[in-house]
Each structure stands twice: as C-alpha cells, then as structure tokens.
C-alpha cells in the first residue's frame, strides 16, 4: 500500500505546484497600469494637438 502511494506522489506534487503557481496571491479587481513613458508620450501628443489647434485658430483669426 505504501509503495502505491509513493508512486503517485509526483503527480500530487505537480498538481499542487501547478495550482499554487497559476493562482495569484492577490486576484481582486486589478487593472493594468500604463508605463510612465507611455503616459508621457500620450501627454505630449495631447499637448501638441491642443497647441496646434490653438495656433491654427489664431492664424485664421489674424487673417480676417
């Protein structure tokens, strides 16, 4: 009987290890955060668009 349980030990170890690794310690309502460099690029793009729009409207009002 003991020999039979020892043969199945690697299977149980693998099952426990797999379930422990695949289950995160904190699995509650998390969401991915963008990297700081991505936020900087987004901010620069938005600022560039706003500045371009402001300059475009200023040029058209100067022509009138």
Image: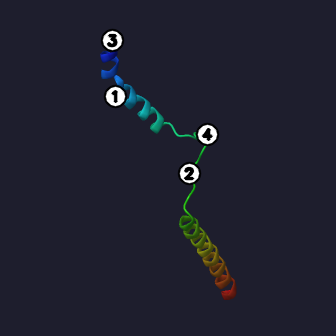
Q: Secondary structure at mark 1?
A: helix
Q: Residue furthest front?
A: 2
Q: Few, some or many C-alpha atoms within 10 Å of disc 4 (few <14, some 14-19, many ≥20)?
A: few
**Structural distance between the alpha carbons of marks 2 and 4:** 13 Å
- Residue 52 sits in quarter: bottom right
Q: Quadrant of the C terminus?
A: bottom right
Q: Earlier in the sequence, mark 3 or mark 2?
A: 3
Determine which residue is flagged by label 1: 10
Q: Which mark is in front, 4 or 1? A: 1
Which residue is at the front of the view, 9 or 48? Answer: 9
Q: Secondary structure at mark 4?
A: loop
Dots 2 and 1: beta carbons under 8 Å? no
**Structural distance between the alpha carbons of marks 2 and 1:** 36 Å
Q: Secondary structure at mark 2?
A: loop
Determine which residue is flagged by label 2: 32
Residue 28: mark: 4
């Amino acid at each position: 009987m003991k020999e039979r349980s020892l043969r199945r030990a690697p299977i149980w170890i693998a099952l426990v290890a797999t379930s422990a690794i695949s289950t995160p310690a904190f699995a509650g309502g998390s969401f991915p955060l963008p990297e700081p460099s991505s936020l900087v690029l987004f901010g620069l793009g938005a600022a560039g668009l706003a500045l371009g729009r402001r300059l475009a409207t200023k040029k058209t009002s100067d022509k009138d």
